[in-house]
Image (cartoon, rainbow, N blue to C red):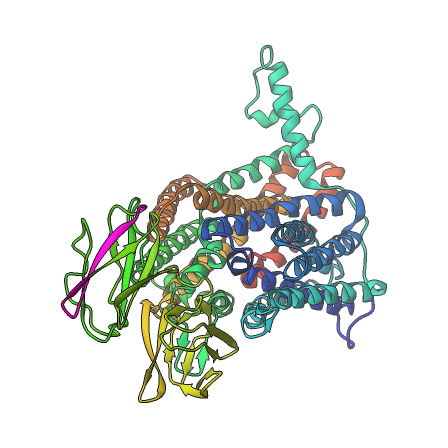
Amino acid sequence: MAKKACGTNYPASICFIVVNEFCERFSYYGMKAVLTLYFLTYLHWDQDLSTAVYHAFSSLCYFTPILGALIADSWLGKFRTIVYLSVIYVVGHVVKSVGAIPTVGNSSVHISLSMLGLILIAFGTGGIKPCVAAFGGDQFDEEHGRERQKFFSIFYMAINAGSLLSTVITPILRGDVQCFGGDCYALAFGVPAALMIVALVVFIAGSGLYKRNPPQGNILLEVCNCIGFAIKNRWRRSQYDSKRKHWLDWAEEKYSKRLIEEIKKVLRVLLLYIPLPMFWALFDQQGSRWTLQATRMNMAFGESFIIKPDQMQMLNALLILVFVPVFELLVYPLVGFCRINVTPLRKMATGMVFAAVAFGAAALVEVNVVKSVVDPAPAGSCLLQVFNLADGDVRLKLPGSAAFQEPIRYLQDPPTYETLPACGEEMKIQVTFNGKLSECNFTSEQQGAYSLLLHSDSTGIHCTQVNDHITKNEDGNPLLRFLNTLPEAMNLSVGAVTFQVTSGVSMSPNRTVDRGRYQDVRCCSPADGCSLLDLGLLDFGASYTVVLTEESGAVVAHKMEDVKANDVHIAWQVPQYVLITIGEVMFSVTGLEFSYSQAPANMKSVLQAGWLLTVAFGNVIVLIVAEGAGLEQWKEFLLFAGLLLLVSVIFSVMAFFYTYVDPDQLDRRYRLDSGGEEEEEEEDEDVKKKTNDVQLNRKSTRLQRVS
C-alpha cells in the first residue's frame, strides 16, 4: 500500500512529483525567456533568423511529446521514461550553458553547442511532457478521485509558478550580472540547468514511494494502425466491395467495432483542430517578436525601476492566474445570466478574435515605436550628419543635393541625418567658413551612414570623416561614443565601461552603457589629472556622441543625440498582453475541456497528441513567415491578425455544423447494440473508470497552461 502524506489520503510520492514539475518548468521557461536576445546579442543573428530558430525550437518541443508517449506506453513505462529523458534534458542544458561562455571556442563552436543543446532540451522537455502529469495521477487509488482532482490543481499551479518566477529571475541574471565583459548568458542558462538537475534528483529520490504501472500499449499507435489498415483495405477491395457506410468500416476485418466507432468520434474533433495552429502562431510570438519590440521601447518606470524586455513575458503567466478564476466565477456566469448561449466552440472562436485584436494593438504600438528609428538609406544613397567644431557658423554645398541649406552653428546637435544621392564614389563638398571657401573629399559606400567633423586651425578648416552606427542597440541600452577635440588623450569611465580617446580630433568606437543618469563621469588626462563630467540621462535606444572641449581651462562635455531615444513606453505593451491572455483563457482552457468532453475516455491521449501538434504547427507557421515574408514588422503583425480573423470565421462555420455528443451515451448505445455481452459489459466498466479520470482531468485544465 502506498505511503500517505501526513495522515491524509494523498500519496507521499506526489510531493516529489510536484517539486519536480516546478523545477522543470522553471528550467524550461527560464531558459526560453532569454533565448531570443541570446540569438540576437550573443550569436549576433538578425531578428528574422533569431525568430525563426526560436520557433523551430518551440515547434520541436511540441512534436517530441508524441515520441515520449510512445516510449512510455509501449516500452519503458512512465517512470523510466521520465528519468532517462530527464538525463538527456540535463545534458542539453549543460551543453547550452557551456555554449554561452565566450572563452569556449569561437562563434562556430558557440552556435554548434547552442543548437545541440536546444535539440537535446527539446527531446527532454517534450518527451517527459505527456508522462509527468499522468504518472502523478497513477499514484492515486480509484476511490481517491477527489484527492486526485486537487493534485492536478496543485500540479498546474506549480507549472504557472515555475513559469512566472523564471521569466522574472533569468532576465535579471542575464542583464544585471556582468560576466566575461557583457550580459551573463552563461549564468542565465546555468541556473535553469541547475534547477533541472534538482528536478531530476528530487524525482529519483522519491523512487521508493512511486506506484508504477507497467506499459500497456499506446492507444495512439493503435489508432494510427487502424486508420492505416482501413485505408489500405479500402484501396485493395473497393473495386468489388463498396457497401461500407464509412471509410473506417473497412477496418472491421481486423479491429473491433467499438474501436472503430471511437476513432470516428475522435476524428470529428480532430477535424476541428485543423484551423487551430493559427492561434498558436500568434500566441507564441510573445517570446520572439514581442520581446524584440520591447527592446525598442522605454523600459523605465520612474528613476529607480527598470523592467527587462524579456521580463514582459511574465505578464501572461501572471494574468492567466488572475483571469481563469475571473472568467469561471464572474464572466461566464454573467453571460449565462443574460441568456446568451455561449458554447465551447463559440468561446474558442471568440478567443481567436481576442488574439487577433492583440496583434492589431501590437501593430499600432509598432507604428509608433519605429518613429524613433533611423531608416537606412535607399540603394545608391547614403546618410550624413555634420558636427561643426569650428568656432563659427559654416555652410555646406554638396553636388547634386539640396541638403544642408541652413548654416550649421558651432557645436550644433545635428537634427537628423541627410540623405545624399550618388554615393559609392568620391564627392567634393564645398565648405564656407569665415567667408573662405574650402573643399573636403568625402568617400562613401552605398547605404552607409557617416559623420563629417569640421574643425579649424590657423591654416583654415579641415574635414574628418567617421563611420556611424545607426541601428539601435539590440538589448535596448544606449550607445555612447566620445569625440575628443583636446590636444591630449583622454580616459573616461561611464559606469563599468571605459573609453580611451586619442588626442586631436578623434572619435572613440560606440560602446554599450546602461541606461541611467551619469552626473559624475570620471575624465582623466595624463597632464591635467581627472575631473568629473555631467552627461545627464542616457536613455533607452539612443546613440550619443559626446564632444569634449576645453572652456576656461576645464573639460566640458557637449552631448549630441545621433539616434533618438525610445519614446514609446513599454507599458503600452500591457493591452496586447491582456488581450492575448483573454484569448488564451477562452481558447486554450476551453479547447482542452471541449476535447476531453467530446471523445471516449480511452482516446484522451489521442486528443492530447492532436492538441500538442496544433502548437507545433503554429510555430512552423511563424518560422515560415519570419524567414519568407520580408515585411515591415507592423505589417507582419497585421498579416497575422488578418489571417487569424479569417481562420476564426472558418472555424465558426465548422463549429456551426458540429453536433455535440455525450461519450457516456456512446458507451451505453454501443453496449445495447452489441447485445449486452459479458465481454462488452466488462469493457464498459473499464471505460467508465477512465471516463471518471477524464472528468477529473477536465476540471484540472482550468488551471493549465500549454506547458
Q: Is residue 430 magenta?
A: yes
Quadrant of the rendering where the N terminus is positioned: bottom right
Query: Considering only vertical position in the picture, is 1 above or below 493?
Result: above
Left or right position of 143 against 421:
right
Left or right position of 360 against 274:
left
Magenta segment: 424-437
**Rendering coords of residue 139 (x, y %):** 76, 61
**Rendering coords of residue 134 (x, y %):** 70, 55
Q: Nearer the viewer, residue 339 or 514?
A: 514
Q: Is residue 193 magenta?
A: no
Find the residue positioned furthest to the top: 240
Query: Considering only vertical position in the picture, is 563 above or below 82?
Result: below
Query: Considering only vertical position in the picture, is 198 above or below 487?
Result: above
Q: Which residue is rendered at x = 49% and y = 83% of the image?
A: 526
Q: Nearer the viewer, residue 107 or 94?
A: 107
Left or right position of 395 against 150:
left
Quadrant in the rendering for residue 303: bottom left
Quadrant of the rendering where the C terminus is positioned: bottom right
**Rendering coords of residue 35 (x, y %):** 56, 59
Please, what is the dominant secondary structure of the magenta stretch?
A: strand
Asked if residue 567 can be seen in this view, the reply is no
Q: Which residue is rendered at x = 41% and y = 70% of the image?
A: 481
Quadrant in the rendering for residue 170: bottom right
**Rendering coords of residue 154 (x, y %):** 64, 68
